[in-house]
Amino acid sequence: MIRFSDIRSAFQFYLAGRTIYDIHSPLLFQIIEAKRQRNNTAIWEPIEAIRREYLNDKNVIEFSDLGATSRVLHTKQRTVAGITRVSVSPPAQCRFMANLAARFTAKSILELGTSLGISTAYLSVGNPKAQIETIEGDPSSYALANALFDRLNCSNIESYNLPFAKYISGLPKEKSFDIVFIDGHHTSEATLQYFDALESHFTEGTIIIIDDNHWSPDMEIAWETLKSKSKVLYSVDFFRYGLLIWGTKTQASQSFSYIPFACKPWRIGLFDQRS
């Protein structure tokens, strides 16, 4: 169901949106280029074949949702098709994250919220040299994800069936991540708690992706709070998800709402010198 708050958020995002021609920061340009990059689709086809298989899978599983209740699926018994349709990141977002992992040569990646493992598989294929740790609280989703990893021979993935907080509390102090994808438990309180607990594991240039940052007014509060963190250098809002870059500030942090040039063809960057 589309809510008034969804329409308002989309309209506000569109008004604020800027295109690639408004970008002057080399780092932000690399981020947007990863978004715009078009790979040979053959490398993603084995993953997408499994997505299509799951979208037609009417098998019912017992689903333990440890996060905010789904706005679409309201029962604990859900079909694989329903979970795939509602909870799995779409192909464009998966490609973007895989491109980031490759473009920035990430060595260590953390994903909070494995779901059925499709986004994790993209990260694995995008950067086979990266060590990926992915966490899923629901046992049924965890089992399906591990079956997917086996089918695709994703050997650089370590998966854990744990609540996020329990996993984070057990991390070694020296552990750090180059990319962190937070996708689960869509409340501001939980999102901020996980972020704060992970801060000591961020390093200079860590990329943090917050999924569904406009999922609800509550999640928008979390997004605005995270953008104002003292060590956030850049924030980029893609509407379905947001991206933060962590590090030592040498200037004021910069915030950017990205919209494809085709959606705002008059935004050619001639009159806006902000980066």
Image: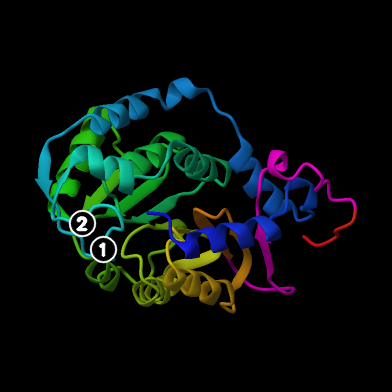
Q: Which mark is residue 74?
A: 2
Indicate the amino acid at tag 2: His
Q: Residues within 10 Å of mark 1 (few under 14, many from 20)?
A: few
Q: Which mark is residue 122?
A: none
Classify residue 155 by image quadrant.
Answer: top left
- Please report the bounds of the magenta region as a residue range: 246-270
Compared to residue 268, the image places residue 195 above or below, namely: below
Q: How is the image coloured?
A: rainbow
Magenta span has 187?
no
Of mark 1 and mark 2, the one earlier in the sequence is 1
Q: What's the residue at 22%, 70% (across, down)?
A: 166
User: Which residue reaches farthest right?
Assistant: 270
Instruction: Work out whether residue 243 can be spotted.
Output: no
Residue identifier under label 1: 69
Indicate the amino acid at tag 1: Thr
For the C terminus, which image quadrant? bottom right
